[in-house]
């Protein structure tokens, strides 16, 4: 059940409930860092919690996001290969520049190059309802980790893992790779 915290009125909570299909819950005033929180509710299965400030109906993503790249879960190349062999519902994401991706990437991976700031228009490549396994060619998954942090903090993605050892480890163990045609 959603919990509405509204100092203004129950009308805003009811509006939220009808608009987003979230069950209407109790109304309790709660001060939070001198701002009043209107609601904290799951918008739909698999979507992030959204916080709404009183008088402001724009969502603020609020997840248990790792504090650093080191806290993002890792997956070994062997575990990823098994998931791929089992045809698990995952998306492998190569965070290398397009040129490096064309030279070779994990078989079936989509290219989503690292960027200082991810453009929301590019997110169509990355479904929210599937496990994303990100990798790059960095020694400690720095680029993939940065992309993962951006996806979780700014866009509410939750099921992300980093490929331990990245592209170099995948290639080292001899697992399937693809190259762009003509490369």
Image: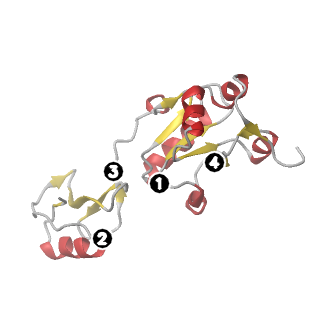
| Residue carrying label 3 | 62
Residue positioned 54% across, 37% down in the render: 83
Give the label, 3 or 2, closer to the camera. 2
> Which is nearer the N-term, disc 3 or disc 1?
3
> Which is nearer the N-term, disc 3 or disc 2?
2
Q: Is residue 47 left or right of residue 117?
A: left
> Which is nearer the N-term, disc 1 or disc 4?
4
Q: Which mark is residue 20?
A: 2
**Percent x, y for residue 39?**
22, 61
- Circle 2 Cα neighbour tier, 10 Å, few/some/many (<14 / 14–19 / ≥20): few
Q: Residue furthest front?
A: 86
Q: Secondary structure at mark 2?
A: helix
Give the label, 1 or 4, closer to the camera. 1
> Which is nearer the N-term, disc 1 or disc 2?
2
Residue positioned 60% across, 28% down in the render: 77
Give how far apart the Cα atoms at labels 1 and 2 are.
Answer: 18 Å
CB-based contact (under 8 Å), mark 1 and mark 2: no
- Circle 1 Cα neighbour tier, 10 Å, few/some/many (<14 / 14–19 / ≥20): some
| Residue carrying label 4 | 115
Work out whether residue 75 or residue 83 is closer to the camera in this orientation and state it: 83
Residue positioned 45% across, 53% down in the render: 129
């Amino acid at each position: 059940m959603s919990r509405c915290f509204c100092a203004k009125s129950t009308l805003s909570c009811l509006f939220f409930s009808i608009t987003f299909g979230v069950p209407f819950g109790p109304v309790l005033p709660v001060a939070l860092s001198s701002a009043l929180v209107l609601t904290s509710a799951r918008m739909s299965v698999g979507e992030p919690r959204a916080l709404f400030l009183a008088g402001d109906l724009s969502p603020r993503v609020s997840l248990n996001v790792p504090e650093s790249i080191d806290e993002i879960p890792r997956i070994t190349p062997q575990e990823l290969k098994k998931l791929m062999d089992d045809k698990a519902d995952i998306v492998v994401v190569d965070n290398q520049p397009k040129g490096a991706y064309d030279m070779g990437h994990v078989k079936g991976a989509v290219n989503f190059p690292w960027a200082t700031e991810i453009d929301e228009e590019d997110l169509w490549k990355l479904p929210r309802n599937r496990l994303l396994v990100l990798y790059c060619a960095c020694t400690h998954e720095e680029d993939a980790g940065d992309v993962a942090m951006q996806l979780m903090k700014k866009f509410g993605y939750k099921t992300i893992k980093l490929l331990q050892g990245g592209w170099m480890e995948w290639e080292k163990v001899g697992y399937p790779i693809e190259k762009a045609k003509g490369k």
